[in-house]
Image (tube, rainbow, N blue to C red):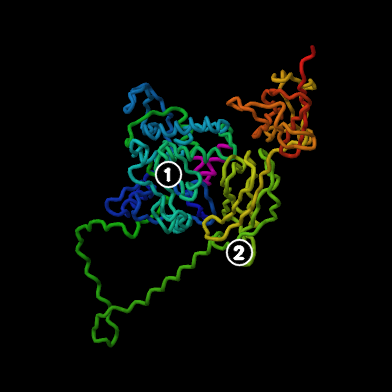
Amino acid sequence: MAAHFGRLRKGATTTAVAAVAVAALSASQAPGVTTDDLGRQAAGAAQPSGDANTGGEGGGATGDSPYYTDLPPLKSPNPSPSASPTTGTTVSVGEAEAGIPATVLDAYKKAEAELRASKPGCNLPWQLLAAIGKVESGQARGGRVDASGTTYSPILGPKLDGNGFALIADTDNGAYDGDPAYDRAVGPMQFIPSTWEWAGRDGNGDGKKDPNNVYDAALAAGHYLCRFDRDLSVQSQMNAAILNYNNSTAYLNTVLSWLEYYRKGTHEVPDGTGTLPSNSSNSHPGASPSPTTPATPSTPSTPSTPSTPSTPKPGSGGSTSPTPKPPAPSSPAPSPTPPTPTQTVDHLEDANTGKLTATAGSAFGTKVAVRAESKASKGVAKVRVRFTIIGDTDATFTGGESVATVVTGSAGTATAPALVAGEKAGDFTVRATVVGRVLGGLDYTATVTPRQADTLTRTSDTALTCVPGGEFADQVELKATYKGAVAGKVAATATLIKSADDATENDKGPYFKDADGKTIRTLTDLTTDADGVLKLPKLYADDATGTFLLRVNTTGGAVLTVELKVAAAAS
């Protein structure tokens, strides 16, 4: 993932100034190139230069790319019933800004429904996706998408080459944004390629994760906002989610304005007819056209005023040679651009990470911590470090994600979120890498041990007896505990053994039956329930009489031997 995100100038502009800036940007495009007012254009088009304050760093889903700053009308939507132009169903009709293209609106609502099922505690409103889609791409350029939701041409942000924008070197070899040198934000929700690589989703069920597809992008944005177990019905958590998407207070306020507007009423409009914003966060007073702006037609020339002859010098013989002008002072050489913090990182060092072990289903007591250092082994602050879980495991970071990105603090240290073990036991790897640099990472081995029990007891003291050829009236039921607490979901094995000293499987006496009714005397893949209880299947007896033993073992060392008696019925 790319590392350095220059903060963009967020100046407020009037409509007139914005129009001038838009015209300048549009004029700089190559003939036939489709572009929007934010400087986002189809792949292969020339990119206008911008202006930025690169003193800070951001990040998020978009790499803090520019966005539309248009605000909703002061008058709230006042919808009235009408028929949908695409489906014939009843929809609301209001002013133009409240209209959302049909396919785009459907994508937002489907993403909300999916998140309601998979992450119900997030409480994601589709209007929030609509608000972000509005400021990021003008609802996919007014809904210029095909029937599957894919944009007719890619929506690309500016080259993030540090020239007026953030500096993000290429992370996807141009796979998503068509640029093998620098990254660009891509698609209706403007994901940078390095974020899409792990956050992308398949929202339309076509088996692909395409950032240019509004269904895929909307679902990915929903999951991105719902990370870290956020509850978006809590305003502070919603604010944090939006700032995580694009780290700017102005961006937050713009999104919240559209969210409130859409909550008061929207209506569906045909694809391709949505209103397009005109003001962007990289527009500013005094913006000059790109050097590639075509020349304007010349106006008829005005007759020039005759120049006044210069006064001849004494003794010059009446010469009218002009007085020589002193040479213009040379322009100072531009000062070199200082390296960004990420460019100064030489390597990662471990920051006293302890042993990573946890029992299945529990949190790890230790967090992975690394330190970004320069060649002089000094900590480097404001560097993005990505932590990735690798291997055959269902362990995750807190919040359910397998990737987490953390910015280093003043000492250069980044600490990953807590790891949470799944039910799958074994080893996996946590890899730490510097985002935006090709440097060797650090690998940490984490181990998940199976759930354990140290004690097994019967839940009943009733004697287990049977007559030859009969079946036992009572089933064996046990309870497992570990250090006095209930031991749920613990693996166990039950075997009818030959004797207390010989734990091999018996070839006579009581037995279980498999699904086909065949005799078996060993049961594997048993698991205690959430309350630590294990109830074995019904037992049967053959013709042998006597006292027999059933031995149950669990992960963690708990063992219990149960007596089974087979005797002829008393006359």
Q: Which residues are magenta?
A: 237-253
On screen, residue 175 versus residue 252, left or right, reads left
Mark 1, secondary structure of its residue: loop
Query: Which label was assigned to residue 347?
Result: none
Three-letter amino acid code at disc 2? Answer: Ser
Give the quarter of the figure containing the C terminus.
top right
- Picture residue at 58% right of the left edge, 40% below the top: 400
**Magenta stretch contains residue 462:** no
Q: Are marks 2 and 1 in contact (CB under 8 Å)?
A: no
Residue 311: percent from the left, percent from the top?
A: 28, 78
Front one among 530 and 202: 530
Residue 312: percent from the left, percent from the top?
A: 27, 81
The span from disc 2 to disc 1 (Cα, nearest Å) is 35 Å
Q: Where 199 falls versus 561 (above or below)?
A: below
Residue 528: percent from the left, percent from the top?
A: 69, 31
Query: Which label was assigned to residue 211?
Result: 1
Q: Earlier in the sequence, mark 2 or mark 1?
A: 1
Is residue 18 in view?
no
Front one among 273 and 313: 273
Mark 2, secondary structure of its residue: loop
Q: Where 399 falls versus 10 (above or below)?
A: above
> Dot 2 corresponds to which residue?
374
Q: Quadrant of residue 205?
A: top left
**Magenta stretch contains residue 252:** yes
On screen, residue 15 versus residue 555, left or right, reads left
Three-letter amino acid code at disc 1? Answer: Pro
Residue 218: percent from the left, percent from the top?
A: 45, 38
- Picture residue at 33% right of the left edge, 54% below the top: 45
Front one among 3 and 47: 3
